[in-house]
Image (cartoon, rainbow, N blue to C red):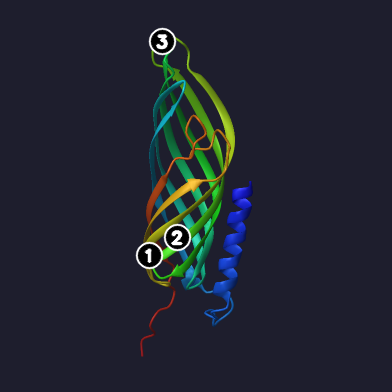
Amino acid sequence: MKKIIVCFGWLLLVLNSNAQRGEVKELGFKKQNVFIGGSLTLGYGNVSNSYGGGSNFVIGANPEIGYSLAEWIDVGTVFNIIYSSTRFNDYTYRYRQTGLNTGVGAFIRLYPIPSFFLLAQPEHNWIKVTQTNLDQPGVPKITQKVQASSFLVGVGYGQRIIGSSSFFTTIMFDLGKEIYSPYRDGFNNAIPIVRTGFNWYLNSAKKKKK
């Protein structure tokens, strides 16, 4: 929780400093500042402690819709569909735990310099978790439905032209501590999450024929 509070405080400072630039010359909604698109999520990591070890894999898609408030800030909503799989050996038996989740969140991206941005993204996920004993195939699978929130922060790089299109790559970590978060492993350690995506602006500006 302290990390989240510090992160929000840091974002507010960046917002305040950038607001002094006076970059927003026109107020009001502009359709050409709306963008739609999304990204693909990929994550992998090894898990281990004194009881054993294994590996964790995450893959997913993240459609989004957003709005560029100015050259230095984007805000929007993101949706998730993510599959995660953890294989683990605790020196007694091996098991695999898989999760399929859908979720929704909000994001803010700050561009302190062109082509480089800072990202904060709180999410809430609905997850179906299935655990399989790999050493005893006859043992019934254990399935349960859970919910988990996450708070992703990270950095990104890409090209962005408001009113045209953009592409980006980010690396993020979950600062939350919820055990069923799709961005944390079986020992509740944060997994590095890499996302690459594209956005297209709804540029309604058309040249009038003379």
Marks 1 and 3, the one that precedes in the sequence: 3
Label 2 crowd (10 A; few <14 / some 14-19 / many >=20): some
Residue for badge 2: 36
Q: Earlier in the sequence, mark 3 or mark 2?
A: 2
Q: Is residue 124 left or right of residue 155?
A: right
What residue is drawn where x is 48% and y is 46%?
173
Residue 184 x %, y %: 49, 37
- Answer with mark 2 or mark 1, whichever residue precedes in sequence: 2
Q: Which residue is mark 3?
A: 136
Distance from disc 3 to disc 2, alpha carbons, whole Å, reads: 46 Å
Residue at left 42%, top 45%?
Answer: 193
Going by the numbered disc 2, the residue's amino acid type is Ile
Kindly identify which residue carries mark 1. 166
Q: Residue at x 53, y 37 (%)?
A: 181
What is the x, y in percent for residue 144? 55, 25
Say which amino acid is labelled 1: Ser
- Where disc 3 sits, the SS reads loop
| Near-viewer residue (130 or 20) | 20
